[in-house]
Image: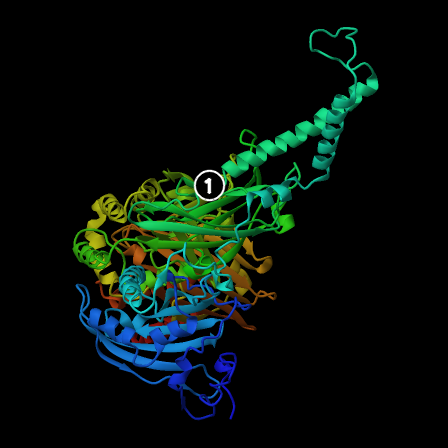
Amino acid sequence: MCRSSELDSFRSHDDSMSSDVSCGEEDDSIPLSFFDDDGKSVGASPEEFPPPYAGGVVMDQKYAVSAKAMNAIIFKPGSAFVKELHEIQKTTDFREEPWKKVGNEPIKRSLSSTRAATKLVKSVKSFETQTYNRADDKGFCIQLTSSTPDAPYGGNFVVEMQVVILALPDSPSGEKCCRVQVSWRLNFLHSTMMKGMIETGARNGIRDSFNVYQEVLARYATPLSERESPRSVSAASDVDEKLISDWEIAWDYFKKWHVLLALLSLIIILVHISLAAPRRKSGLEFWIINFPDSLMELLISALVVVQVERVAIMVYNFVRARYWQSGDHGVKAQGDGWLTSVTLVEGANIALPDSGAPSPYVVFTCNGKHRTSSVKMRTTNPAWREIFEFNAFEDPPSTMEVEVFDFDGPFSEAESLGRAEINFLKQSPGQLADFWVPLDGKSARANGSKLHLRVFLTHTRDTDALPEYLERVEREAGLKVRKRSAQKNSSFQKLFSLPAEEFLINDFACAIKRKIPIQGRLFLSPRLLGFYSNLFGHKTKFTLLWEEIEEIKETAQSINPSIVVFLRKGRGFDARHGARGIDGKGRLKFQFLSFVRSGTAFRAIVALWKNRNLSFEQKMDIIASVEAGDMKYSVAERQADDRQPFLGIEEAPMSEVVRMETPITVDVLHTYFTDDQKERSVNEKLGLSNYESSPWEIVDGKTGIQRRHRSYRLSRLITQFGSQISGIQQKTISIDSKKLIINEILTLHDVPFGDHFQIQTRIELETLSMQPITTQYKAFVGVAWHKATELDQRKVTKNIYEHMTNQFRSLIEIIVDEVQPPHSPAKDEKRKDDRRKDDKRSNGF
């Protein structure tokens, strides 16, 4: 008969449990004797218990019972405590399966019940799985996984809780003691826009439930106050620090050779004074003033004074540091909203200051508020274990700055030993729950300086926030600008790896200006501005925090106005790949152009930038007001957009619209895309006015691939809007100049719904033979939809295909006419054949 691994260490002196538990490949029910208390006295656990879950600790209490007895009270089948708890919480249909062990798997059981209805949610069925992750003489660790699939959004998440029962040393009176710690977290199975609201509701519900849980448990086990309970030495209580007396700190601080020499010198001088006989005054001595009588006396006096002065400064700094020891540790946050709490655990490899051994302290800055830690005297590996809280903010913060200083007296200039920035938008709550942050600085990076932090960002509003939010969304579905659909918000958050509380407010088709403009899309949210592009397979993505932006300008150009964004000096270097350059003040400059409606985009960007500290509802009202002149489009677009998936900037499926053969080589045709005079002549005949193009630029160092930006205006004979069109072209030519491919992405401006789509085209030219000269010409067109519209997309797409087909056919005909005589019989016959083929292909499309 073999013994389960979970029970190997859970045996008594007389091995009374050796015959109770067996293991095998079949399901073995765990006997009730597993929950018996054998009365064995234990010491502190030498092994690490797992840390609390990221959601936080909802219960941490010590009781005057053994850990084994507490385990039986809570988890023994048929527990009276569980029955009374369910009666108070009005839980019905409770069913529990016996504890079982299958093979080498942990001990587990399943529970089910019907939870009572609340003011928000009707009564729902709940399913729970309880698993022993650890069970021995040192304590127990049980994981609870609960799901409520019938609750609103219940299929998107499960609640995971960790119950740790730690065995403590006996009290001085010989009484058994234990500690119960319960933490929780949410595990989202699917992405949902309601993630923030679900977390808030779950947090408040769990908090209220465990208030009742703790009250009922107190009837079955006597709670111990901190004054009465023994000090826990378990590794799970790693936040508790061993108290060190002031004498121990002073001994460690003053344990230096120069302090010893100063004391010896001072003692010798005092002994000399007591033994020396008085002498008469001489020279310039008068009253009680006594000068050295030789150079040696002067030198010795100077040495003693310097040594004593140095020790006196150390004593002064030590007293001031001990007076400042409390810092902001333990100061409770006030207000209701987004609460930021930071646990400063420890530091490692703190850089040495110019004055010698460091006495570090840490300053946290969040939304302009500061919190300061205590000073740790003369150590490069300080241990703080202090908790700081910032008063609640209306909006979630974007960043928090952390800086380590060296304490060298209250009036001396603080010397920075390293700094770091925590970005709440780039790190998930799970990552922030327990992590080491490396420090930057002139010597911090070389020394590998880092801090151990636990950061929690929580929303403290009550459960009424969920129905209020849903009501507000329904209200804003009218004429007010509102947040996007859950699916589109989820796609936006996934695209930029953002937390669930960050919502998309608006987005615009545009380009960023670099050597070659990059066409993409600009996204606006409460805390950031983001850009994304997927141009010919090259992806460009970056984000800018509103706090990083120092200045925003709009360049008033008649053809192609742009928006220029300047960042604060030293900020935004992770987005420098999208910057236009650096201005004279050392600031990164980003230039956005090719907007369909640049005025609307500029006002929306400025409104969000200037009102970063307003509430989300106020921001939505501002955005609605600045877009008031554009509401004839925005209402219909947004209502349709919320029913459609997020489409993004991706390659569109393309269809062949023109295929024909020409008696001109690729080398000759290529000149009509590189020679400025020839290109302008062809474009004038196509009806394109105000034509402008940038020089071809080599892409990625490959001479065969080049890219440029061009813009032109269509005449009103072609379109009633006289639309301005901007595009990015990329050409690829083979080494032998027999094959040429030209890809282009076109954006239509000043056209209704012009920011909903982009036109993608491709021209393929290939010389098939030289005798006779035959070059195959093929043109492809695709439409990439970025937003949904109530218009018929098929109808709009067909209209675009027809226009581009005529333009591509006219383009090659104009080039052929310029190269060959206009009335060649062979040419006329071939043109008729090509037209018949194209007509058949168009009818088939």
Q: Quadrant of residue 62?
A: bottom left
Indicate the amino acid at tag 1. Gly
Q: Quadrant of residue 408?
A: top right
Residue nearest the viewer, comparing 792 with 586: 586
Residue nearest the viewer, comparing 621 with 593: 621
Q: How many marks?
A: 1
Location of mark 1 (residue):
327
Q: Residues within 10 Å of mark 1 (few under 14, many from 20)?
A: some
Q: Position of residue 564 (x, y in %)?
A: 41, 42
Q: Quadrant of residue 457?
A: bottom left
Tell me: residue 638, above or below residue 552.
below
Q: Position of residue 371 (x, y in %)?
A: 44, 42
Residue 89 seen from this side: no
Q: Residue at x 17, y 52 (%)?
A: 479
Q: From the viewer's perspective, is 396 left or right of 514?
A: left
**Could you tell me which quadrant the C terminus lies in?**
bottom left
Residue nearest the viewer, comparing 739 with 823: 739
